[in-house]
Amino acid sequence: MRNWCQLSCRLLATLSCLMVFPTFSAQTISASDQGFLYTGRVDFSKPSQPLLSWPGTSIKANFTGESLVILMDDANGKNYFNVILNGQDQFPAVISLQKGLHEYDLSYLLFNQSNAVNQIEIYKRTEGLEGATHFLGLKLDDNARLLAPPKTLKRKIAFFGDSITSGMGNEGANNGKDNVESEKNHYWSYAAITARNLNAEFHSISLSGIGMMVSWFDFIMPQYFDQLSAAGNNNSKWDFSQWQPEVVVVNLGQNDSWLIDNEKSLDPAPTERDIIDAYKSFMLELQSAYPKAKFISALGSMDATKAERKHWVGYLKTAISELNKQNNHHPIDFIAFDFTGYQGHPRIAQHIQNADKLSAKIKSLMQW
């Protein structure tokens, strides 16, 4: 009995030591550290807690060490982020954020990576519908460090669009639902793929359900496009002068076509001239915001480009033709993404096809 008691006491003492003295200690790297590279419309009004809300907003950093903990404070607990290590985007870790401030330990990604320099990308899959997230930095080993950030890309593209641009449902099964938050992955939207094809930085100003004249809710893109925060219709303002793209792609009209033609949501119903003028008005606003950019008007690849709705392609082409006559120094190009017959939101395979088509268009336009 005495030997057992002695052994038990020794075991308890050993366990106590293990709990009191962990194998490593951690340091917190503030989100304001110069080693972080941010892309997208990010609200830096609180530098140590930058706010990410738009789809495709990302954070990159180069770091050393054997532990990796991400600090995030999410408004609603509905957002999903890709965490990509060393560019291996086919195999990201996907974190489902909980509401409030939480730590997300991804140290397991560094298995067999000791003493190496690693690059991390934290990428917002979801959009303003899921709300905004404060990034509070990383926890690394005490002897680890954040290195110089990745280089900023020189080419810049801005995308304005709806659920197609956001990537709604793109990871869903072909016969599955379209509105599952975990299956919305902007990283594999045609916009993000196009940017990667062309080695360009991008901003994605998109929201599922939005239109230029009418949306599935009570605000439209002309009331939304100039916001700093994507979380609903709000009074935040983006400073366009701080980021000027060389190319602007506008893919709007899908929701307008459905809500005007099918749902009869506008009373009185708009005339052809009303629709053309509304599109022209918004494009002029964007041209004013981006006076040196080349513009591409796009439509599709959902049913707004099907044969039975060819009048919507006609509306946009007429608007573009009239705008180009008014200002032939900066002509707007047009591209239609083909309707394949698939009735839901495009899946990744269709996004890749659309991105290849758009990439070729931009390469030709810009000589990239």
Image (spheres, rainbow, N blue to C red):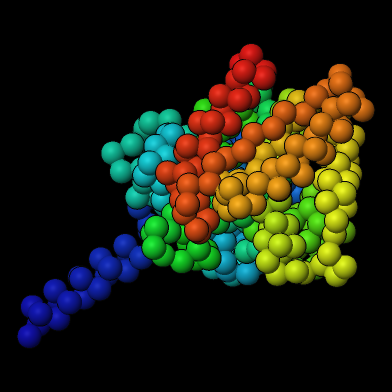
**Above or below, comparing residue 41 to residue 324 in the picture:** below
To which quarter of the image does residue 113 belong? top left
Residue 4 visible, this orientation:
yes
Q: Nearer the viewer, residue 168 or 97?
A: 168
Q: Nearer the viewer, residue 63 or 198?
A: 198
| Residue at the limit of the structure toward the right, as seen here | 326
To which quarter of the image does residue 258 belong? bottom right
Q: Quadrant of the C terminus?
A: top right
Q: Nearer the viewer, residue 4 or 284?
A: 284
| Residue at the limit of the structure toward the top, as seen here | 367
**Above or below, comparing residue 290 to residue 256 in the picture:** above
Q: In this rendering, would 33 be left or right of 315?
A: left
The residue depicted at 77 percent of the width and 29 percent of the height is: 332
Q: Position of residue 54 (x, y in %)?
A: 67, 51
The residue depicted at 25 percent of the width and 66 percent of the height is: 14
| Residue at the limit of the structure toward the bottom, as seen here | 1
Q: In this rendering, would 269 be left or right of 2?
A: right
Q: Position of residue 95 (x, y in %)?
A: 47, 57
The residue depicted at 38 percent of the width and 31 percent of the height is: 116
Q: Quadrant of the N terminus?
A: bottom left
Residue 61 visible, this orientation:
no
**Above or below, comparing residue 316 to residue 78 in the picture:** above
To which quarter of the image does residue 88 belong? top left
Query: How many numbered dots are placed on residues in this image?
Result: 0
Q: Position of residue 123 (x, y in %)?
A: 55, 46
Q: Position of residue 303 (x, y in %)?
A: 58, 53
| Residue at the limit of the structure toward the front, as seen here | 308
Q: Nearer the viewer, residue 11 or 64?
A: 64
The residue depicted at 39 percent of the width and 63 percent of the height is: 175
